[in-house]
Amino acid sequence: MVRSKRELLFIAKGENDKGESCSHNVHKNGGSIFVSGPNFKEHLCHPSVSSAEQIKREIYLVFQTKVTDIEMP
């Protein structure tokens, strides 16, 4: 069994609904995209999510964080 390596796509920085700044790490593992939040909560994105704009929308829906900046590794 071959395990695929987790790759950091980008770090999304923004403000949550309380006005606090926070960041989310976006990883790709095989064909799946994972978003980890500031409280170590991890979210597996739907398979149809593939672009940065769709990932930003997913972060807003799941973590209530409006992404204002994307930092590439």
Image (cartoon, helix red, strand yellow):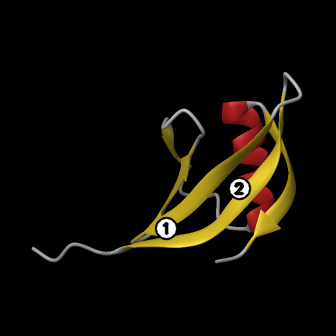
48 and 22: which is toward the camera: 22
Q: Which mark is residue 41?
A: none
Give the x, y percent position of residue 9. Answer: 60, 72
Secondary structure, mark 2, is: helix
Q: What residue lies at 72% left-to-right and 68% top-to-bottom?
A: 51
Give the x, y percent position of residue 25. Answer: 59, 56
Among all residues in the image, which is located at the extreme top? 18
Q: Which mark is residue 28?
A: 1
Q: Is residue 27 left or right of residue 54?
A: left
Real-space Cα distance between discs 1 and 2? 12 Å
| Residue underneath mark 2 | 55
Mark 1 burial class by Cα count in 10 Å: few <14, some 14-19, many 20+: some
Can you tell which quarter of the image residue 11 is in? bottom right
Q: What residue lies at 53% left-to-right and 70% top-to-bottom?
A: 8
Contact (CB < 8 A) between labels 1 and 2? no
Q: Callout 1, which amino acid? A: Lys
Rendered view: 11 above or below 7: above
Picture mark count: 2
Instruction: Specify which label sits upstream in the sequence, 1 or 2.
Output: 1
Q: Callout 2, which amino acid? A: Ile
Rendered view: 23 above or below 61: below
